[in-house]
Amino acid sequence: MRRTAARAGANPVAHAPVPEPVAAPEQNPAPAPAAAPAPAPAPAPAAQPLRTEFPFELPRGYVDDSGTVHKDGVMRLATARDELIPLRDVRVQENPAYLSVVLLGRVITRLGTLAMVHDGVVENMFASDLAFLQDFYRQVNAEGHTRAAVECPHCSEPFEVELGGSRLGES
């Protein structure tokens, strides 16, 4: 029900004023003991430089035109540009699976004694080496953020699941 104020000339209804709750008288608490000075914060661990290059060894190896097998290589961390530029490539636009070839050609900085590594080298690798490099790329660039700890709903046993995407450049 809604109450309205009494109008002038109308028969006012007398309302008993609602008493305000009365607060208990404040008691003086005992003075708090003087706080000991806070200990100095522990020195931060020495910052380690960011690791940007990662060595790898291909399972089979890339065979160049002269028959030399190249297995040892180095991959660098990918930048946003590395992942964006291949999207403009006509080959990638026509066939999205080609993204990993172009992307790996950008981030592999060394492979055996080859003077230069590019997407043409990557597209001529064995499928097992390409799969290895795709997985290695995800490990290097995700830095462990693609796995999550979960618990089995039936037996409560903890385990990890992979959350990463299925192709390079996906999360």
Image: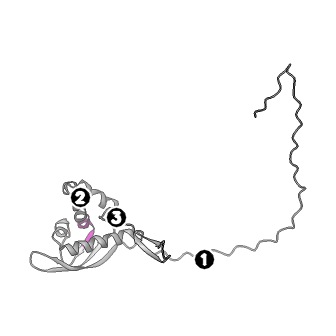
Q: Residue 151: where, in percent of width, then height?
A: 48, 73
CA distance for labels 1 and 3: 40 Å
Query: Which callout, 1 or 3, points to the residue nearer the camera?
Result: 3
Image coordinates of residue 145 in percent, x first then y, are: 42, 69
Q: Quadrant of residue 102?
A: bottom left
- For label 2, the SS is helix
Under mark 2, the amino acid is Pro
Expressed as whole percent of the image width and height from the top left, the position of residue 7 reads 82, 23
Q: Pointer 1: what residue? A: 42
Q: Residue placed farthest to the top in the image?
A: 9
The answer to whether mark 2 and mark 3 are in CB contact below 8 A is: no
Is the N terminus in the top left, top right, bottom left or bottom right quadrant?
top right
Q: How far, Cα to Cα, is label 2 from label 1?
A: 50 Å
The answer to whether the residue labelled 2 contacts the one labelled 1, judged by CB atoms less than 8 Å apart, is: no
Which quadrant would residue 15 be assigned to in this image?
A: top right
Per the rendering, the mark at residue 165 is 3
In which quadrant of the rendered view does residue 67 lie?
bottom left
Closer to the chain start, of discs 1 and 3, is 1
Q: Nearer the viewer, mark 2 or mark 1?
A: 2
Is residue 49 at all visible to an observer of this figure?
A: no
Q: Is residue 60 magenta?
A: no
Tell me the element at label 3: loop
Neighbours of disc 1 within 10 Å: few (<14), some (14-19), many (20+):
few
Kindly give the residue lying farthest to the front in the view shown: 154
**Residue corresponding to mark 2:** 96
For image coordinates 68% across by 75% down, the residue present is 39
Q: Amino acid at mark 3?
A: Gly
Looking at the picture, which amino acid does disc 1 mark? Ala
| Front position in the image: 16 or 131 | 16
Per the rendered image, the range of residues in magenta is: 103-109
